[in-house]
Amino acid sequence: MRTALFEALAALATLAPLAALTLALPLVVARAEGAHTARAVLKDAKGEKVGTATLVEVKGGVQVVVKAQGLPPGTHGVHIHAVGRCDDPEFKSAGPHFNPTARKHGMKNPEGHHAGDLPNLVVGADGKGELKGALEGATLGQGSASLLGPQFTALVVHASPDDEASDPAGNSGARIACGVIAHGR
Ligand SMILES: [Cu+2]
Ligand SMILES: [Zn+2]
């Protein structure tokens, strides 16, 4: 018994520095890139994963890439909403569009647009779609234009196309998928 215990302790002592190193490496990477990238995992009302969003801070704003699968074919409005919560099945907890500059909705609206407005996502017959967009003036850093502020934010996909003009949400219908935007790659 005594020998077995001793051997186990000796083995642990050998492994400990290795384990510490393995843990430290991802932390360093996360710290280096955390300020400039963010991501969201999109889930539908049943909690099924239906895509991801990757956000990268660039000069003057934030670039967004959405990759979706398992969504209904067609054209879907996509926005950043002001609260990073996707709790209820209708995703009302995500609040209205992210709008730190108090504008109206839509790229085609003369009084627009919200900082969280994005182009429509086109989903094919296979349920897959990809969207690349830019959030001008948004940041992943500090301040009121931050997507990672005290309330965080959420990316929401809607059932219908966004007409890019009607306030407050472009007539894009029900919220069918949601993902909280969080630090990370
Ligand atoms: Cu929306
Ligand atoms: Zn909007």
Image (cartoon, rainbow, N blue to C red):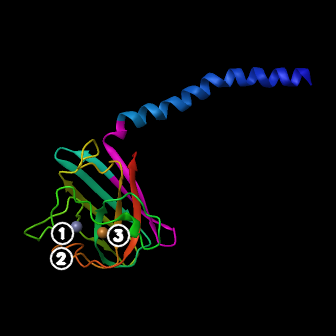
Secondary structure found at label 2: loop
> As rendered, which of 109 and 150 lies closer to the eye?
150
Dividing the picture into quadrants, the one containing residue 29 is: top left
Vertical position of residue 107 compared to residue 151: above or below: below
Q: Report whether the residue tagged 1 is closer than 8 Å to ligand 2.
A: yes
How far across and down, in percent of the image, does residue 91 sit? 41, 69
Residue shown at the point (18%, 69%) measured from the top left: 105
Q: How far apart are marks 2 and 1 (CA)?
A: 6 Å
Q: Residue 166 carries which label?
A: 2
Q: How far apart are marks 1 and 3 (CA)?
A: 16 Å
Q: Name the residue under label 1.
A: 105
Q: In which quarter of the image is residue 86?
A: bottom left
Label 2 with label 1: CB-CB less than 8 Å:
yes
Residue type of the residue flagged with mark 2: Ser
Quadrant position of the N terminus in the picture: top right
Q: Is residue 40 rendered magenta in the image? A: yes
Does label 3 point to a residue whose CB lies under 8 Å from ligand 1?
yes
Which numbered disc flags the more N-terminal residue, 2 or 3? 3
Magenta: main secondary structure equals strand
Q: Are marks 1 and 3 in contact (CB under 8 Å)?
A: no
- Residue identified by numbered label 3: 157
Q: How crowded is mark 2: few (under 14 residues within 10 Å), some or many (20 or more)?
A: some
Q: Tell me which amino acid carries mark 1.
A: His
Magenta segment boundaries in residue numbering: 33-54
Question: Earlier along the polypeptide chain: callout 2 or callout 1?
Answer: 1
In-image side of 91 versus 164 (left or right)? right
